[in-house]
Amino acid sequence: MGSSYLYLLPLTVFVLFPSTFIITYTLSVLLHHTEPDFPYISDTGTYSPESCIFGQALNLGALVIFITIYVRYRQIKELYHNHSTSSHIVKLNRLGLLIGSLAALGISLVANFQETNVFFVHITGALMAFGLGTVYIWVQVREKIFLFVCIIVIWSEGDCCSAVVQTLALRDYRPLIEPTVER
């Protein structure tokens, strides 16, 4: 997969998860496995055949999320390997990879262990998916803030250098700039 198609990874997740939930909800209501009045998402994937679709689609989604997390890890790693000596952001990036991978594993646990069969594992997976997923997002925000600060500093340094060069260049041409008074 070329780097020009990496945008398809989060787009796939964006399409896959809602369509999975809609399909399994529709099937479970039509087969009378759940009530139509807003059941839990896990309730719509409890009984066969919707549990098969639910499990396969969530496993595929967990894989795509993991690949997306790994691509983001490599992007940050390459950026800071070539442009920075900060070890803080490199450690934070590794932590983000670990936390994001565990969140993707949590999605897979939710998919493979139905709520009615193995409740503890299902809830553990849900907590991993939602809890660690939230922590992963905060790690990414922290990396982005650090990157933004670095860009602002670089831009400010360039802006200051530009101002100094312009001031020095215009110093010799001050008589041309000063207004003349007509009598």
Image (cartoon, rainbow, N blue to C red):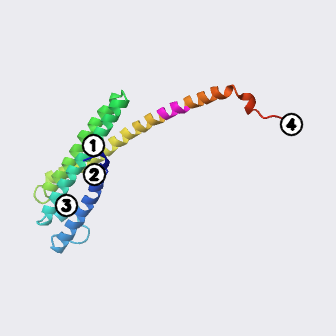
Report, in whole angstroms, how far the alpha carbon at label 3 lies from the one at label 4: 85 Å
Q: Pointer 3: what residue? A: 42
Range shown magenta: 153-159
Disc 3 versus disc 1: nearer the observer? 1
Q: Residues within 10 Å of mark 3 (few under 14, many from 20)?
A: many
Magenta-colored stretch includes residue 3: no
The answer to whether any part of residue 127 appears in the image is no
Give the image location of residue 119, x and y in percent: 14, 55
Q: Are marks 1 and 4 in contact (CB under 8 Å)?
A: no
Q: Pointer 4: what residue? A: 182
Q: Earlier in the sequence, mark 3 or mark 4?
A: 3
User: Does dot 3 land on a helix, a strand or a loop?
Assistant: helix
User: Does dot 4 land on a helix, a strand or a loop?
Assistant: loop
Question: Which mark is on residue 71?
Answer: 1
Q: Pointer 2: what residue? A: 9
Q: Are marks 1 and 2 in contact (CB under 8 Å)?
A: yes
